[in-house]
Amino acid sequence: DVQLQASGGGLVQPGGSLTLSCAASGFVFSDYTMSWFRQAPGEKPEWVSSIGRSGGSPISADSVKGRFTTSRDNAKNTLYLQMDSLKPEDTAVYYCTRQSDYASRGQGTLVTVSS
């Protein structure tokens, strides 16, 4: 079974940083583009970023560009999201997905940005 488990969320003050991780199993991780999505309370899911199979040329939504960095370690089957200069509007549950298939998401991790 495909399993994706995000971790690393928590409460952080505006301007702070967090690094999320996503552990993948049940498929050949290096064969797939991977993505991050987030869903704020009462809102629709929002695509955050995607990264190619080898880790090159990640792309990000305009809302996070310049603040969030996506990377991966294929040897560890792990996807990362480094989040800097966090804003209250970044508060959401963050999920990783295989390719850009939101339905493939597993357990998310809650990020709360508040003073």
Image: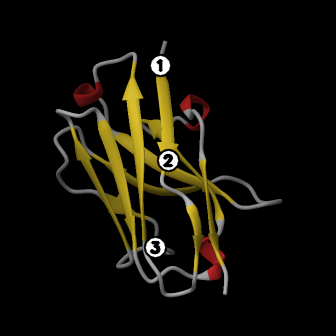
Rounded to the nearest whole Å, what is the CA distance between mark 3 and mark 2?
A: 19 Å
Q: Residues within 10 Å of mark 1 (few under 14, many from 20)?
A: few
Residue 102 percent coordinates (x, y): 58, 38
Q: Is residue 62 left or right of residue 107?
A: left
Q: Tell me the number on the disc at residue 64.
A: 3
The answer to whether 2 is drawn above or below residue 33 in the figure is above
Amino acid type of the residue that numbered disc 1 sits on in the rendered structure: Val
Mark 1 vs mark 2, foreground winner is 2
The answer to whether 114 is drawn above or below residue 29 in the figure is below
**Total marks placed:** 3
Residue 114 percent coordinates (x, y): 67, 81
**Residue situated furthest right in the rendering:** 42
Q: Nearer the viewer, residue 91 or 98?
A: 91
Q: Residue at x 22, y 29 (%)?
A: 30
Rounded to the nearest whole Å, what is the CA distance between mark 1 and mark 3?
A: 27 Å
CB contact under 8 Å: marks 3 and 2: no
**Residue with the mark numbered 2:** 7
Q: Compare marks 1 and 3 and give the one earlier in the sequence.
A: 1
Residue 1 percent coordinates (x, y): 49, 12
Q: Tell me the number on the disc at residue 2.
A: 1
